[in-house]
Image: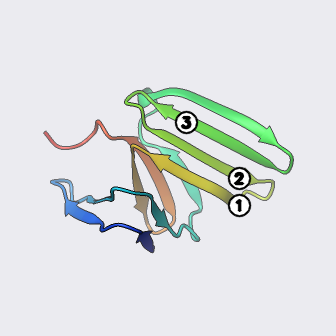
Amino acid sequence: MRIKSSTPLTMHEDCDGILHVRTRTTAVLALDEIKSIGIENMLDIRSYTITPIVGSVSHFIRFLDGGEVRLAYNAQGCLLEFSAQGVAVEIQDGNRLTMASLRRGCP
């Protein structure tokens, strides 16, 4: 995975061994190999809207703590768009992406 940002990135590892990456501006991640996208805990979701668009399907997810995710797939199941703000994003096995509320973490 590649990460690109116009401002410096800060990184730290928490007590669970998760690497956290933060930036003051938008960070761009290359997600070429993502095969599946999931939500860690459905109880953290405030709303989830699915909108069919010609040849694709768009998803908008709002978390209880204010985080938001937008993603879209084409008719063949290929990821066209993914953006997340205020959400923890974990990539497992190099190709499985899991989204979670930022409220989670270590005490």
Residue 97, placed above or below residue 58: below
Label 1 – label 2 distance at C-alpha: 5 Å
SS state under label 2: strand
Say which amino acid is labelled 3: Ile
The quadrant of the image that shows the N terminus is bottom left
Say which amino acid is labelled 1: Cys
Q: Nearer the viewer, mark 1 or mark 3?
A: 3
Q: Is residue 21 left or right of residue 6?
A: left
Q: Number of marks in the image? A: 3
The residue where tag 1 is placed is 78
The residue where tag 2 is placed is 73
Label 1 – label 3 distance at C-alpha: 19 Å
Residue neighbourhood size for the residue with mark 2, other residues' Cα within 10 Å, grouped as few (<14), some (14–19), many (≥20):
some
> Which badge, 1 or 2, is on the more N-terminal residue?
2
Q: Considering depth in this image, is 26 or 45 the residue closer to the camera?
A: 26
Q: Is residue 68 left or right of residue 54?
A: left
Q: Residue at x 48, y 66 (%)?
A: 29
Q: Considering depth in this image, is 56 or 7 the residue closer to the camera?
A: 7
Q: Residue at x 20, y 54 (%)?
A: 16
